[in-house]
Image (spheres, rainbow, N blue to C red):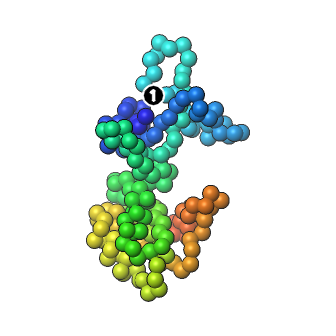
Amino acid sequence: MVVRPDGTPCAPNEPGELVHRGALVALGYWNDPAKTAERFKPAPGQDPALPLTEMAVWSGDTVRMDEEGYLYFIGRNDDMIKVSGYRVSPLEVEEVVHATGLVSEAVAFGVPHPQLGQAIVLLAVPKEAGLGTPALLKECQRRLPAWMVPAHIAVEDGVLPRNPNGKIDRKLLRQPFITLFEQVGK
């Protein structure tokens, strides 16, 4: 199911949280009652007359379902960036940057910003030496809506660090940039 925060079903193509249920859904997070309580909640749309409450996993993934029932992943709720009231999936920004053909790797994340709520930071590894921030910024401005254009772009050498799952370590890379916009507007 794709549901709104109140558990009601989303309309076709409306982003919402992926909730799944069934016999093969895990029973909880091993030895982690807090995580279990956060993710395992009553399934939406149950008949209140039923004697047992069916549990479902509220995944934390934002998806949309088209008219035919196909699901499209948008991003993780905990990774979403909120810029001036707009919800931005870092994956959307990264896909656009990859589509330029200028980078081999890219990662986007949000950092606190006093006026915007959050600002988008983009780190990218160029395919060829000599790619500068201005060229990448120009491509972002050309391909993205203004509210999705990164407020800060850094071109990195080498390979971006990975977490134990082999994914780019967004949280580690975000740390040095958390206070980047602290002085803006002061």
Q: Which residue is mark 1?
A: 44
Vertically, is 56 above or below 147? above
Q: Position of residue 98 (x, y in %)?
A: 41, 68
The answer to whether residue 186 is seen in the rendering is no
Nearest the viewer among 22 and 78 is 22
Residue drawn at point x = 35 percent, y = 75 percent: 137
Nearest the viewer among 72 and 181 is 72
Vertically, is 1 above or below 108? above
Vertically, is 123 above or below 67? below
Quick check: 156 left or right of 164? left
Q: Secondary structure at mark 1?
A: loop
Residue 153 image-quadrant placement: bottom left
Q: Quadrant of the N terminus?
A: top left
Quick check: 149 left or right of 35? left
The answer to whether residue 106 is seen in the rendering is yes
Vertically, is 137 above or below 169? below
Residue drawn at point x = 56 percent, y = 78 percent: 158
Q: Position of residue 80 (x, y in %)?
A: 44, 54
Residue 97 image-quadrant placement: bottom left
Residue 132 image-quadrant placement: bottom left
Q: Position of residue 12 (x, y in %)?
A: 31, 39
Q: Amino acid at mark 1?
A: Pro
Q: Quadrant of the C terminus?
A: bottom left
Number of numbered tags placed on the structure image: 1
Instruction: Looking at this view, name the residue that lies furthest to the right.
Output: 31
Residue drawn at point x = 34 percent, y = 71 percent: 140
